[in-house]
Amino acid sequence: MPRLPEPARARYHQEMRAAKTATVATARWTHLERAHILSQPDPWLHTGNHLAMFSLAVRQRDRREALGQVVRIIAAAPASLAGRYPEGNTGRARVGLRQPMPTPPDLAALLHPSAA
């Protein structure tokens, strides 16, 4: 069984596409944060999400966010492989690396379909 249920993987890709096409920076970040929540169980998707966050931070000339994303890019795959990631964490630099956060109900239903 895959680490990430297929509906969650599909929504991850939808959120990443929405982040690319959003015309407002706050909307881009919202979509990337939602994608991050979904990506955490998968080392490749998780790392790719942090790369996208890093890219957006650089485009916005946000040094603090970009530096925080470098740390997260390094930690993403090992954390996913070990299953040691804080559920619901949005992945932004302003949020602690190990800080769990409430998962939006629509994403929680995709990540844990048997609990829904």
Image: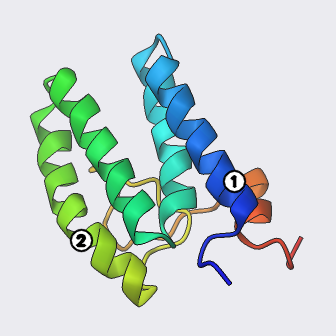
Which is more foreground, mark 2 or mark 1? 2
Q: Which numbered disc covers residue 54?
A: none
Left or right for 61, reference 108: left
**Residue drawn at the location 15% of the way across and 54% of the way down:** 70
Question: Does residue 52 sit above or below 42 in this rendering?
Answer: above
Residue 104: % across, % down = 69, 53
* Res 102 quadrant in image: bottom right
| Contact between labelled residues 1 and 2, with CB atoms less than 8 Å apart | no
Circle 2 SS class: helix
Residue 67: % across, % down = 11, 48
**Image quadrant occupied by the N terminus:** bottom right
Residue for badge 2? 75
Question: Does residue 20 sit above or below 2 in this rendering?
Answer: above
* Res 26 quadrant in image: top left
**Residue drawn at the location 48% of the way across and 67% of the way down:** 40
Residue 116: % across, % down = 89, 70
The extreme front residue here reads 1
Cα separation, mark 2 vs mark 1, equals 23 Å
The extreme top residue here reads 23
Question: Does residue 32 sit above or below 99 in this rendering?
Answer: above
Circle 1 SS class: loop
The answer to which of marks 2 and 1 sits earlier in the sequence is 2
Circle 1 Cα neighbour tier, 10 Å, few/some/many (<14 / 14–19 / ≥20): few
Residue 36: % across, % down = 47, 53
Circle 2 Cα neighbour tier, 10 Å, few/some/many (<14 / 14–19 / ≥20): some
Residue 22 in sight: yes
Q: Identify residue type, mark 2.
A: Ala
Left or right for 7, reference 31: right
Q: Which numbered disc covers residue 104?
A: 1
Q: Identify residue type, mark 1.
A: Pro
**Residue drawn at the location 75% of the way across and 57% of the way down:** 7
